[in-house]
Amino acid sequence: MKIKISFLDIKKSLKSPTYNFPKYSTQILNLANQNAQATRPKAVGQLSDLIQEFHGKDIKEWEEWYIKKYPDALSIAAIKITEMIKNLRDSITKINEEIISEWLKDLVIVKTFIGLKFQEAILKKGAEIMKKNYRLSNPPEESKGIDGFIGEIPVSIKPITHKAKKGLNEEINAVIVYYEKLKDGIEIDFSELVKKE
C-alpha cells in the first residue's frame, strides 16, 4: 500500500512555520546561495549529521540548539546571499536581446555540438599523443561499446563516474579512456591507452 504525504502535510504535522515567498524569489535565492556557497557544510555545518546529533522534539528546540552550536552561521550566510543578489541584480540590468540571442546560440548550437562531438576531440588528442591516426567507430562497432580507434586500438570513451560502476556486467573489448567535465573544459586520462603502446 502506497500513501503520498505532501510537504505541506509534513510541515503541519511537525508544526513547522510556512513561509509565502514572492513568485520566482526562491529560484533567485537558490541561485544566489549556490553561487555564494553560503550554506555549504563548512559555513553552516553538515546538517544531515547535526540533525542526528539533535535530541530535541520540536522545531523551536532545533532552532535554539542549532543557533547555540553555530551562532553566526545564518547571519554570515545572509550577508553572502545579499551580496550575490546585488551581483545578480547588476547582471540582470545588463542582459539585452543581443546577449539573450548569443546565449541561446551558445547553448543550442555550440554546447550541443561540442557536447555531442567531444568524443572525436578526445580521439584526435589521443592520436596526437600516440602519433597515430584515429577514426570514429561504425554502427556495428558502436554496438560493442567502441567509440573509435586510435591506430588499431579500439577505444571506449567514458565519464570518470563510470569507474565506480565497473561492477556492472558490461564487457567492452576496448581501451577505456576516462574524462571528467570541468568548468572550463574536460580532463582526459589517456594512461590506459599509453600502456597499450
Image: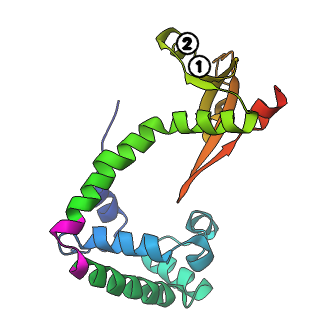
Identify the residue under disc 1. 146
Left or right of 62, for residue 123: right
Q: Which image quarter: residue 3?
A: top left
Residue type, label 2: Glu
Q: Give the range drawn in magenta.
A: 93-99
- Residue found 66% across the figure and 44% down from its top: 188
* Badge 1 element: loop
Identify the residue under disc 2. 141
Cα distance between the residues tagged 1 and 2: 5 Å
Tell which of 138 and 68 is nearer to you: 138
Give the image location of residue 145, x and y in percent: 57, 18
Circle 2 crowding by C-alpha within 10 Å: few under 14, some 14–19, many from 20:
some
Judge whether 21 appears above or below 146 on screen.
Answer: below
Give the image location of residue 80, x and y in percent: 46, 85
Q: Is residue 92 visible?
A: yes
Q: Are marks 1 and 2 in contact (CB under 8 Å)?
A: yes
Tell which of 62 and 130 is nearer to you: 130
Residue type, label 1: Ile
Quadrant that contains the C terminus: top right
Q: Is the magenta stretch mostly helix, strand or loop?
A: helix
* Badge 2 element: helix
Tell which of 54 and 182 is nearer to you: 182
Quadrant that contains the N terminus: top left
- Residue found 73% across the figure and 33% down from its top: 131
Residue 166 tag number: none
Give the image location of residue 195, x and y in percent: 84, 30
Left or right of 74, for residue 55: right
